[in-house]
Image (spheres, rainbow, N blue to C red):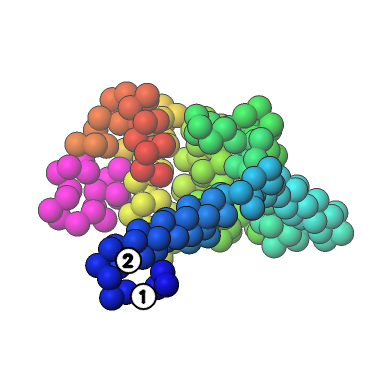
Amino acid sequence: MLFDLRSRGRRSTVRVIYLFLALTMVVGLVGLGIGTGNTGGLLNAGTNSGTGGNGDQLAAKQVRQALEAVRKNPSAANWANLLEARWTAAGSGSNYNQSKSTYTASGLNELHRAAAAWQKYLTASGYKPQLQYAILAAGVYQNISQWSQAATAWNYAAQAAPPSEQLKPYLCLALSAYAAKQTTKGNLAAAKAVQLTPKLQRLTQKSTLQSAAANASTAQTYLQADC
């Protein structure tokens, strides 16, 4: 019989048969997409394994909810929520070109609306904004190239920050002021930033700020990179 392994020739034949069966099984499993670490294979042919994103819809919903909240109660907290919602919407879906890292026209429109929400928040808070919202507003203004307004927001951030967190707000305030060609304001903030900088880094920091003071475009570049 075939599986009588006493004969050397039959043992060779059995090995060939088992090898053939093993290869057949591997090919079959790969074709079915089993054990290959992916979702391909014959069982998945013709199906769409991707899922549609809902970032746009979620961001739009958050904006609608925030708008409804400020209509009912224009409190500082509700205006802050609208500021955050507008900022999130600006960077979502079709409002932001991921490949170019730039805002589209609709995204820029959301940023301008975020800036308007910040102004309402500022008034409602009695011009005492929380640190996180001042920093967020500064980011909004930087992305729409309103350097003077960005400097104002960073100034609020510097005032709201505890002493251990004041270095970045003062540094960014200086850069924003230089970007807006507000040299006097920039120099005052720069002096404070250098004072807050660790000693071993002060010369480098001072050199950076001097370059920014000399050229508004350089200040804008530093601002976008570091703030």
Segment colored magenta: 190-206
Task: Residue 98 in the image: state x and y as whole percent.
Answer: 53, 36
Q: Which of marks 1 and 2 is nearer the N terminus?
A: 1
Does dot 2 land on a helix, a strand or a loop?
Answer: helix
Q: In the visual, does 45 lie left or right of 135?
A: right
The tag on residue 10 is 2
Q: In this view, does 205 lie above or below 222?
A: below
Is mark 1 in CB contact (under 8 Å) with mark 2?
yes
Q: Disc count in the image?
A: 2
Q: Which residue is drawn at 22% across and 43% down?
A: 205
Of residue 7 and residue 95, the one placed in the foreground of this image is 7
Q: Which residue is drawn at 25% across and 30% down?
A: 211
Prevailing secondary structure class for the magenta stretch in the rendered image? helix
The tag on residue 183 is none
Of residue 149 and residue 108, the one placed in the foreground of this image is 108
Label 1: how many residues lie within 10 Å, few (<14), some (14-19) or many (20+)?
Answer: few
Task: Residue 223 in the image: state x and y as whole percent.
Answer: 39, 37
Of residue 204 and residue 48, the one placed in the foreground of this image is 48
